[in-house]
Image (tube, grey):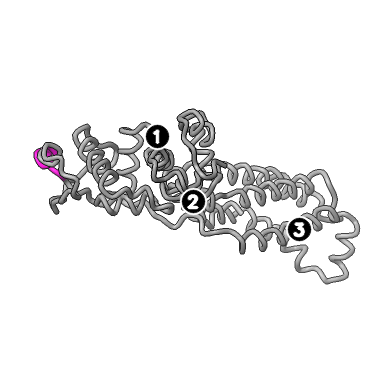
Amino acid sequence: MYLYIATLTNQRNRLPWLIHFIPAVVAYLLLLGFYTLSFSQKIIVYQNNGIGFESLLSIIRFPIVPSGLIYVVLSLILLKKHRKNISGQFSYVEKINLNWLVYLTIGMGIIWLSIILGNDISTFILVDLFILFIGYFGIKQVGIFANQITDEPLVAITSGALKNHEEANDSSPLIISNEKTKYEKTALGDEQLLNIHLQLKLLMQGEKLYKDPELSLDELAKRLGVSSNTLSQVINSMEGRNFYDYINNLRIAEFKQTVILPENKRFTLLSIAFEAGFNSKTSFHRNFKKATGLSPKAFCQQEKIQLGNQS
């Protein structure tokens, strides 16, 4: 389960995965004496609580029980880290949640508690239910995280070109040169941060990419000609928020600008929110209240905005 979560969330460490199975291999080798017994002899050993293998079973059980609980805790830590990573990679999270894996991991923890405190019957029942839930949630779950963060070269824009573009008040897309600039892996310089941030602002103002409800960090980075981790650093440093909050704040600003227009009075709050880039009522209400401290309906009442439906 731990390795499944690590692979699914792209958090595999550099240690070979086979290392995790060494304790199990050692245990099976120690139990070879039991496996070579005849069927009838195995039944006798089982019915008499491991007679003849008591010391060996105690030795094996000692690391097995804590390891199960340890892997449950490690799995939950991976899921917590990945939840944070999703907010840094996607502008929508409603369909990319990991709740089902959290439930399964907690279920695994309950199974281990049954092994420690319960009996074979309760353990086998819990294992059967666990397998059913794996099948159900595994089929139902939407793809989680297919984007890989790579260290791609950044496309440079000279300060002079940026200044000329601003002075000309040109709303057309900025033409980016093919000149490549190498950046250190650890951090970007102040000028580099400013240049890429300006590129980002011009792109958002010109093309309003935030109106795409499924916009991802990887897609936006490709449009700017930078790597995903570089763009993430720029947004975190210059905007003081992660990618998810940055994009949804732009959508909220777009909603505010659109909802006050007289010609939009015939539309509903939700239709205007969808036009701004939100993909669900829940996401819209949650992000709007987080950014403004008000519900969308309360905001409209405060601004004396009348729409067809303010639910």
Q: Amino acid at mark 1?
A: Arg
Query: Which sits in the foreground, 38 or 185?
Result: 185
Residue 274 highlighted magenta (yes or no): no
Q: Nearer the viewer, mark 1 or mark 3?
A: 1
| Identity, as a three-letter code, of the amino acid under mark 3 | Leu
Badge 1 or badge 2: first in the primary sequence: 1
| Residue holding disc 1 | 241
Asked where in the image residue 310 lies, by quadrant, the reply is top right
Q: Does residue 250 appear anywhere in the picture? A: no
Callout count: 3
User: Please, what secondary structure does the residue beneath circle 3 have?
Assistant: helix
The residues tagged by marks 1 and 2 sit, at their Cα atoms, a distance apart of: 21 Å
The amino acid type, in three-letter code, at marker 2 is: Asn
Placement of 160 over or under 41, stated as above or below:
above
- Residue 138: x and y in percent read 61, 61
Where on the picture, by quarter, is residue 3? bottom right
Relative depth, front residue between 12 and 65: 12
Q: Which type of secondary structure does the marked residue at label 1 adopt?
A: loop
Q: Give the magenta range.
A: 157-163
Q: Which residue is mark 3?
A: 129
Looking at the image, tell me whether mark 1 or mark 3 is earlier in sequence order: 3
Instruction: State the quadrant of the C terminus.
Output: top right
- Of residues 39 and 172, the one nearer the viewer is 172
Percent x, y of residue 248: 42, 41
Measured Cα–Cα span from mark 3 to mark 2: 34 Å
- Any mark on residue 279, and which? 2
Left/right placement of residue 117 relative to residue 109 reads right
Measuring from the top left, give residue 73's x and y in whole percent: 62, 42
Residue in view at x 49 percent, y 28 percent: 302
